[in-house]
Amino acid sequence: MLRTSIAALALTTSACAPPPVTMPATEASEVLERFAAGAAPGDLCTGQGRALLRGAVRAYGAAMAEAGETWPNAPVFGDAPENLTSVEVMVMISVASGFVEMSDLRGQARMFARQMTFAHWPSIRDLRRATEVACPELVQLQQTASRFVLERERYESLRERAERGGQRSHERLQRHAERLETSLAQMQALADAVTRKVQESRRTT
């Protein structure tokens, strides 16, 4: 069924952004997992790719709502729970990136998205324009930020162990802290690249 959705998107010829793809929740789950794993079945720098992701978010969110569950289940840009999944991180960062619309979320999840205060998400003005002129860099930024959020959760877990453990635990914690610093530097570099492209596009229009 996933191939059917992708084929349908390829046939879209409208100059306007295509609407979110309609799909069953089982297919939506597969699509979301692939996006979160970095093996996206669609290019987020195209209207078709965003329509595929938005459709998956809508379909899976609707299924979770019918089951009485809030999904994504936490404001991941604040204090994230220990059971946070890579898919939830990817979806909420997609909202921040402009690849997923606020209207694609349901109920409590929509409120969480409005309250996002992820301190490490670099400030980028005019995300809408950024998706037009610096989309590849913005996608890379999203992927790096998703990894950072999950790695940060792992760091907190390791820190708690280090407080109870010996020298090896502290050495492992230090290595992980260095990886986090590298991720932060990568995010800032990508954000700077996006900002430069946005500024250049304004000067030429």
Image (cartoon, rainbow, N blue to C red):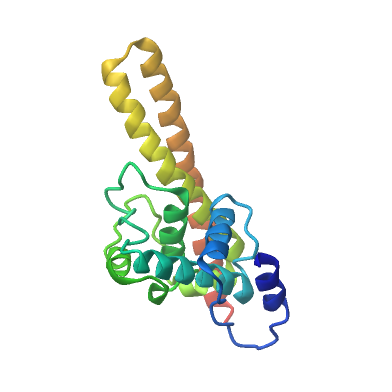
The answer to whether residue 153 is left or right of residue 100 is left
Farthest-out residue, top? 167
**Closer-to-camera residue (15/86):** 86
> Is 186 drawn above or below residue 99 in the view shown?
above
**Residue at horizontal 36 percent and vertical 27 percent from the top:** 158
Residue 167 location in percent, x, y? 36, 11
Q: Quadrant of the C terminus?
A: bottom right
Q: Which residue is at a point 38% across and 73% down the rendered structure image?
A: 102
Visible residue check, residue 199: no
Q: In the displayed structure, does residue 142 sit left or right of residue 2?
A: left
Task: Give 31 or 1, whichever is nearer the viewer.
Answer: 1
| x then y, percent, for residue 16 | 60, 87
Q: Quadrant of the N terminus?
A: bottom right
Residue 43 visible within the image = yes
Q: Position of residue 11 (x, y in %)?
A: 73, 81
Vertical order, 82 against 177 (above or below):
below
Which quadrant of the figure has residue 106?
bottom left
Q: Residue at x 27, y 17 (%)?
A: 164
In the figure, 183 relative to 143: above or below? above
In front of the other: 37 or 176: 37
Question: Camera-side residue: 123 or 27?
Answer: 27
Q: With 56 as the anchor, is 118 left or right in this view?
A: left
Residue at the image position 30 percent from the left and 45 percent from the top: 81
* x and y, in percent, of residue 17 in the image: 58, 83
Q: Residue most toward the front? A: 67
The number of discs equals 0
